[in-house]
Amino acid sequence: MKHTHKIHLLLLVGLIFSLLAACAPQETVLSEDEADAVLAFSEEKTDNLLAGMRAGDYAAFSWDFDQQMLDAITETQFETLKKERDAKLGAYVSRQVNRVVQTGDFYAVFYDAEFEKDDAVTMRVVFRIAEPNEVSGLWFDK
């Protein structure tokens, strides 16, 4: 009898995890034409963000941020982020688009980025689908 309860509990837990996974927004890799449309606005915004970071200019860095990003990365947090990123990765050198995806109400552009101290960094910049397509996320992953 105890064994049956354990099996039922495991099946219930498995079912719950399956349902939760099904409810999460699915990531869809965009076609070349769809990706080009996203890159038409995202590349300039990403350039501005990186130039602002390189210059230590919070106003330029955060110019295209949505309110959540402005709340998440204040000027003080920007200074800390810049110092940590510069110490670990060095200055930004270049990037190449790896893929563009849509997840729910957001586009994410994944880049293969090169920095002075590391030439294999995945950079992800997330944009709201709704115009004016504000920046809603930024990650540098090693």
Image (cartoon, rainbow, N blue to C red):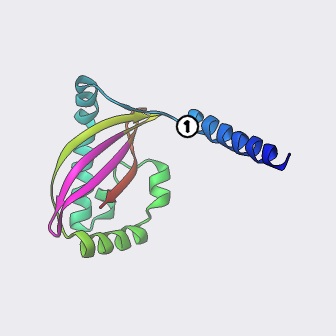
Residue named by callout 1: 24
Task: Name the kind of residue labelled 1 in the image.
Answer: Ala
Residue 115 at what x, y percent from top left?
Answer: 17, 63
Residue 102 at what x, y percent from top left?
Answer: 39, 33
- Judge from the rendering whether residue 108 lies leftward or rightward of residue 32; answer left or right: right
Q: Quadrant of residue 116?
A: bottom left
Nearer to the camera, 43 or 32: 32
Residue at the image point whose x is 50% and y is 58% from the top: 71
Q: Which residues are magenta?
A: 108-126
Q: Quadrant of residue 52?
A: bottom left
Residue at the image point whose x is 27% and y is 25% from the top: 31
Q: Report crowding for label 1: few under 14, some 14 to 19, many 20 or more residues within 10 A (C-alpha).
A: few
- Judge from the rendering whether residue 91 lies leftward or rightward of residue 83; answer left or right: left
Give the quadrant of the C terminus: bottom left
- Mark 1 falls on what kind of element? loop
Instruction: Tell me: residue 101, above or below residue 90.
Output: above
Q: Is 129 inside the magenta-drawn segment?
A: no
Q: Is 117 inside the magenta-drawn segment?
A: yes
Nearer to the camera, 102 or 37: 102
Residue 32 at what x, y percent from top left?
Answer: 23, 26
Residue at the image point whose x is 76% and y is 41% from the top: 8
Residue 95 at what x, y percent from top left?
Answer: 17, 51
Residue at the image point whose x is 22% and y is 29% from the top: 36
Q: Quadrant of residue 10?
A: top right
Instruction: Tell me: residue 122, above or below residue 30.
Output: below
- Judge from the rendering whether residue 10 lies leftward or rightward of residue 26; answer left or right: right
Q: Disc count in the image? A: 1
Q: Main secondary structure of the magenta part?
A: strand
Give the quadrant of the N terminus: top right
Instruction: Tell me: residue 136, above or below residue 79.
Output: above
Nearer to the camera, 48 or 31: 31
